[in-house]
Image (cartoon, rainbow, N blue to C red):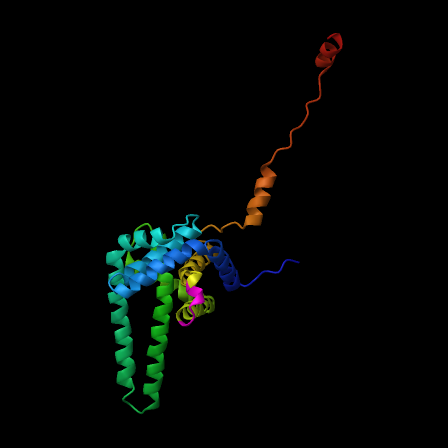
Amino acid sequence: MRLKLPAFLRVIGRSMVDWWDSWLDLVGAVLVWLVAQVTIVLGPPATFGLYYTAHALINGESLGARGVIEGARQYFVKSWLWVLLNLFVLALVYSNVRFYGQFENAWAGYVQIFFVMLGFLWVMVQFYALAFLMEMERKRLLVAVRNGFFASMASPVFSVLIALFAALALGASIFLVLPLFFGVPALAPILAVRAMYDRLEAYGIREREKTPKEIEREQASRIEVPRFKEPTDGEEQVKKES
């Protein structure tokens, strides 16, 4: 009996394979992304560029550092609109948490918890939103955010576990030096794109991607074994006369 892994473990496993197979190219991409963060102005576009690189990688094209630069150029304006939207929402969450913190009533504490959870949900939605934006033909930021929200709500446990693993990868890269030399920060957008595809396949919106073993079996079934034609009586007679 074949053991079927939970969806989030399959996504993590395939993402790790994607990262390991292309880690040398991803090191260059991560270095460009890090340098861009120092400039502040190029930080958000480079983040979009890293998602652009991850999306291309999963679709069979390894761009490396060039992908970050191309993505940053293509999404420069949208990346800053995304930053402004995030600042507005997070400022709204922060101001409400601080405002209700002035009251000593029990209900005020519950309202604070509600807004804190709302903030975490918003961050998780952004994890999906950039992946959706890379996949969409018409690059509309608010539609990508909406799709990210629906994906998060449709599979909350799956989304939380994937996002936590991505956060661990980023945390390891911040507090440890070695992961940076292996391009580990690129694992987060790879996880986001893989998770997006998995949810689209799970709900029948996208055709399921075939595994290497399925492709191998399919190709093997197409190989035709040559059949030797039995000679007719006339052909036998010609052979005898010759």
Q: Is residue 65 above or below residue 221?
A: below
Q: Residue furthest bottom?
A: 104
| Residue 64 spot, x, y in % from top left | 38, 52
Residue 145 figure quarter: bottom left
Q: Is residue 239 magenta?
A: no
Between 10 and 44, the one lying in front of the other is 44
| Residue 210 spot, x, y in % from top left | 52, 49
Report the span colored magenta. 175-180
| Residue 32 spot, x, y in % from top left | 33, 58
Visible residue check, residue 213: yes
| Residue 82 spot, x, y in % from top left | 27, 63
Q: Is residue 223 above or below residue 159?
A: above
- Quarter of the figure with the N terminus: bottom right
Tally of numbered tags: 0
Q: Residue at x 43, y 49 (%)?
A: 59
Visible residue check, residue 145: no
User: Is residue 8 left or right of 62 when viewed as pictured?
Assistant: right
Residue 218 figure quarter: top right
Between 171 and 13, the one lying in front of the other is 171
